[in-house]
Amino acid sequence: MKLSNSLYYLKQAGMGVWRNGWMTVASITVVVLTLLILGSFVAINLNIVAITDDVKEQVEVLAYLKDDANTQVLRQQILDIPGIKELTYVSKEQALESMREQLGDGITEALDGRNPLPASFEIQSNNPDEIPNIAEKIQLLPGVESVDYGQEVVQRLFQFTRVLQIFGLVIIAVLGVMALFLIANTIKLTVYARRKQINIMKFVGATDWFIRWPFIIEGIFLGLLGALVTYLALFYGYSVLYMRASVWLYENFLSVAMAPPELVGLELLKILFPLGMGIGAIGSGISVRKFLKV
């Protein structure tokens, strides 16, 4: 593309945006509305992932020990299992004290000096999805009485989060296609209003790409502007929501946290601007193609 042609394309694109004031506003509005829906779902999906990851991180394996277990040897055997992140030993006395704090002093009086609780190891993994496999390996170690990690609840949680993440990606893809369709049809109206100009240029010998480039640049500009408005609205709106809701969520829902605004802003930046520019360019290219067939 020659420099003179590039300047001409930019000039024509700018003139097109300026001259078609209301259609420009309509195109940007459609871009903003469609990207708002898409961006909102991206933010929701990021929070679903963040919350489920937090819940997964809190899942741990409890290995209850036999009274005659060699805790030092058993500790090393557990640490040798691949994927172990952290291991904490809880003695019989600590377990009883913890139960007393939860149920009150009456429980120790009822036990009459006896301590029926076993010692245990609290085990966390690097990858929560590997917890079932780790629990199976720990169960086979000598000195381990039983293993518990809330098997049914954890397995259902992992299945649910996998389905939820796949569903989120499918919805985002569908919304992306819908955004392309809506924006392309809106841009088509602006192209239709200038069909006579396109026909005249064709008759005087202008090539298809010479005619097409100003419209594509115009579409990129509209998509970029729409993405900017959408990004600012979503980022600042989410930041306000985060400040008001994150503390309540952490205190009332298993100590999980919302995705921080910085992460959401970065993801929106990576998605909205390329998507807005791409959809604007593709929408313009599709829309002008019909009028090039003279």
Image: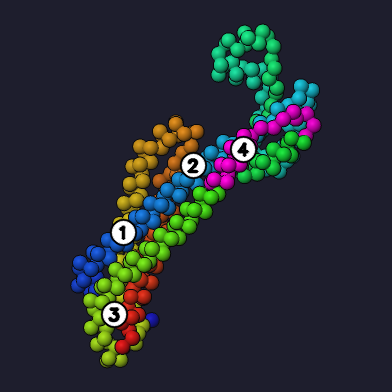
In the rendered image, the vertical position of residue 29 relative to residue 3, given as above or below: above
The mark closer to the camera, 3 or 4, is 4
Q: Amino acid at mark 1?
A: Val
**Can you tell which mark lies on residue 8?**
3
In space, the residues marked 3 and 1 are separated at their CA atoms by: 28 Å
Q: Amino acid at mark 4?
A: Glu
In space, the residues marked 4 and 1 are separated at their CA atoms by: 44 Å
Q: Secondary structure at mark 4?
A: helix
Q: Residue at x 41, y 54 (%)?
A: 268
Question: Residue 179 appears at what percent x and percent y?
Answer: 37, 63
Mark with earlier residue (3, 1): 3
Q: Amino acid at mark 2?
A: Ile
281 or 136: which is nearer to us? 136
Q: Residue at x 27, y 83 (%)?
A: 198
**Can you tell which mark lies on residue 152?**
4
In the rendered image, the vertical position of residue 34 relative to residue 199, given as above or below: above
**Magenta span has 148?**
yes
In space, the residues marked 3 and 4 are separated at their CA atoms by: 66 Å
Residue 140: quarter of image: top right
- Residue situated furthest bottom in the rendering: 204
Task: Name the residue beneath numbered marker 1.
Answer: 32
Q: Which residues are magenta?
A: 141-161
Question: Residue 91 appears at what percent x and percent y?
Answer: 68, 22
Question: Residue 57 appears at what percent x and percent y?
Answer: 57, 39
The mark closer to the camera, 3 or 1, is 1
In the rendered image, the vertical position of residue 287 relative to residue 171, given as above or below: below
Q: Residue at x 31, y 75 (%)?
A: 215
Q: Secondary structure at mark 3?
A: helix
